[in-house]
Amino acid sequence: MLRINRLKKKLRAGERATGCWIFLAGGDSTELLSLCGFDAFIVDHEHIGADFRTLIEQLRAAQASDTAVLLRVPSHDPTYIQRALDAGVDGIVVPTVETADEARAVVAATRYRPKGGSRGVGYPESRAAKWGLAETEYPREYLDQLLVAAIIETRKGVQNLPSILEVEGIDMIISGPGDLAADLAPDFSRLAEYGSDDDAELHALVAQIESRTKSAGRWLGGVARHPRAAPGFYARGYDFVTLTADIWLLADGAKRALADAQGKL
């Protein structure tokens, strides 16, 4: 729903922000995590079998706090992006953006005409505009609160990043080293071995994403697979870092509990 975007507010103030990935369906775990102090969630619709009814349940759960909710959409599909915005997400994260034309199309899907947008005018009936109760405020204020992030995760995307960064409306670039490693690896079955922090080519591509994004004055986002890696991201200029994910927290906690118990048996 139309509200202050906590993530965008912190980034505008020059503050570092933290996030958590949401892969599990349902609102209970989302509500619990929203009370723990994260600035934003990224709910995943690219790799899990979620639907919009589940998304709305998660949005309602997260809005028990002021945690912002971004949705990683499954593709560049403008219809999906528009439905996500009408559902009331605080921002979108778009995978595998490789060209400026793709970036422009993504931005167009988030905006109304006549300013280059292609989004259908359905906000008076949408949850985003408080089911029409914010019909007057929504068209004036939604862009100021909306955050649009593009994930750069292929060599082609890195090569075209300078032109992508020229597209007005792309607020954040997120580095995607996992898919970059897949783009580089000669054998996918050995991807886990190849995509290491010690791989020179992967490191060079990620460094290009970092330097070009910061030079362009855009916010830089990153994915830390463990919270202890976060200080390194911030030291390299990242503005927003996802520290963990709901499934990682659950799995790590379960393994730690078992290990602790077994060590005392």
Image: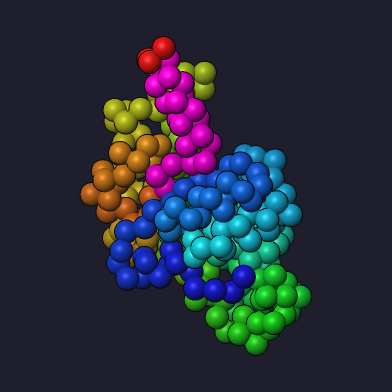
Residue span colored magenta: 242-262
Image x and y of residue 183, in percent: 48, 33
Residue that sits furthest to the left in the current view: 235
Q: Is residue 150 magenta?
A: no
Q: Residue at x 70, y 62 (%)?
A: 83
Magenta stretch prevailing secondary structure: helix
Residue 155 appears in the figure: no
Residue that sits furthest to the bottom in the current view: 136
Image x and y of residue 36, in percent: 44, 52
Judge left or right: residue 250 versus residue 217: right
Q: Which color scheme does this rendered protein use?
A: rainbow
Q: Residue at x 58, y 46 (%)?
A: 29
Q: Is residue 255 magenta?
A: yes
Q: Nearer the viewer, residue 169 or 55?
A: 55
State the quadrant of the C terminus: top left
Judge left or right: residue 28 versus residue 245: right
Q: Residue at x 64, y 51 (%)?
A: 27
Does residue 213 lie above or below 166 as drawn? above
Judge left or right: residue 113 versus residue 223: right
Does residue 76 lie above or below 140 as drawn? above
Image x and y of residue 180, in percent: 44, 36
Judge left or right: residue 41 versus residue 54: left
Residue 226 appears in the figure: yes
Q: Residue at x 68, y 64 (%)?
A: 87
Q: Give the quarter of the image for residue 9.
A: bottom left
Residue that sits furthest to the top in the current view: 265
State the quadrant of the N terminus: bottom right
Q: Nearer the viewer, residue 118 or 74?
A: 74
Image x and y of residue 38, in percent: 43, 55
Q: Give the quarter of the image for residue 263.
A: top left
